[in-house]
């Protein structure tokens, strides 16, 4: 009987890694801890939105060159969060490529362990601008 087949639960595979939502939560904590002056948001994902936009986009203040000493300039950045085994879609790859070509920063963070690397990058970027 078809209804009986449809109602049977498939056995679930045990997760080998943290879900992407856990990675996103850790990224939010890293932003709060490491870069409180940074502005960021999470674009709404859905059928009406642009495909490939990273999970986080924002601006952080960066101080550059001797001619501009004392001035802060915005640096556009984006972060795409992935579970350890998550893959970047072709649309996401294209968006990241476009951001980098425009001289913005586009990071891909894989797993909760990747957030440690993000924290180091944020510290280096923001320490240089102090």
Image (cartoon, rainbow, N blue to C red):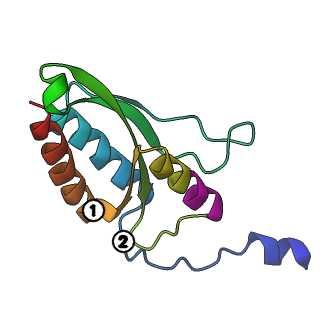
Which region is colored magenta? 90-95
Q: Are marks 2 and 1 in contact (CB under 8 Å)?
A: no
Q: Residue sitting at 53 percent across and 35 percent down?
A: 43
Q: Is residue 55 left or right of residue 91?
A: left
Q: Is residue 112 magenta?
A: no
How many numbered discs, if any? 2
Judging depth in this view, the residue of 31 and 6 nearest the camera is 31
Q: Residues within 10 Å of mark 2 (few under 14, many from 20)?
A: few
User: Quick check: 86 left or right of 123?
Assistant: right
Tell me which corner region of the image, top left, top right, bottom left or bottom right, holds residue 126: top left
Secondary element under disc 2, as helix, strand or loop, is loop
Give the secondary structure at mark 1: helix
Q: Earlier in the sequence, mark 2 or mark 1?
A: 2
> Mark 2 — residue?
17
Classified by dominant secondary structure, the portion drawn in magenta counts as helix
Residue linked to disc 1: 114
Q: Residue at x 14, y 47 (%)?
A: 124
Q: Residue at x 22, y 33 (%)?
A: 32
Q: Residue furthest front?
A: 67
**Quarter-of-image position of residue 7:** bottom right
In this view, the mark in front (2 or 1): 1
In this view, 100 is above or below 129 = below
Return the residue nearer the eye: 55 or 76: 76
Residue 104, quarter of the rendered image: top left
**Other-residue count near label 1 (Cα within 10 Å), few / some / many at <14 / 14–19 / ≥20:** some
How far apart in space, not on screen, are marks 2 and 1 (Cα)? 12 Å
Residue lying farthest to the right in this orientation:
1
């Amino acid at each position: 009987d078809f209804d009986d087949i449809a109602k049977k639960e498939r056995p679930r595979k045990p997760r080998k890694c943290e879900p992407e939502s856990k990675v996103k939560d850790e990224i939010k904590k890293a932003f709060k801890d490491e870069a409180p002056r940074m502005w960021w948001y999470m674009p709404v994902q859905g059928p009406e939105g642009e495909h490939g936009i990273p999970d986080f986009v924002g601006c952080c203040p960066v101080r550059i060159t001797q001619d501009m000493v004392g001035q802060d300039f915005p640096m556009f950045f984006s972060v795409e969060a992935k579970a350890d085994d998550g893959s970047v879609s072709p649309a996401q790859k294209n968006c990241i490529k476009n951001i980098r070509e425009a001289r913005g920063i586009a990071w891909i963070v894989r797993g909760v362990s990747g957030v440690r690397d993000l924290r180091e990058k944020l510290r280096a970027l923001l320490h240089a601008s102090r």
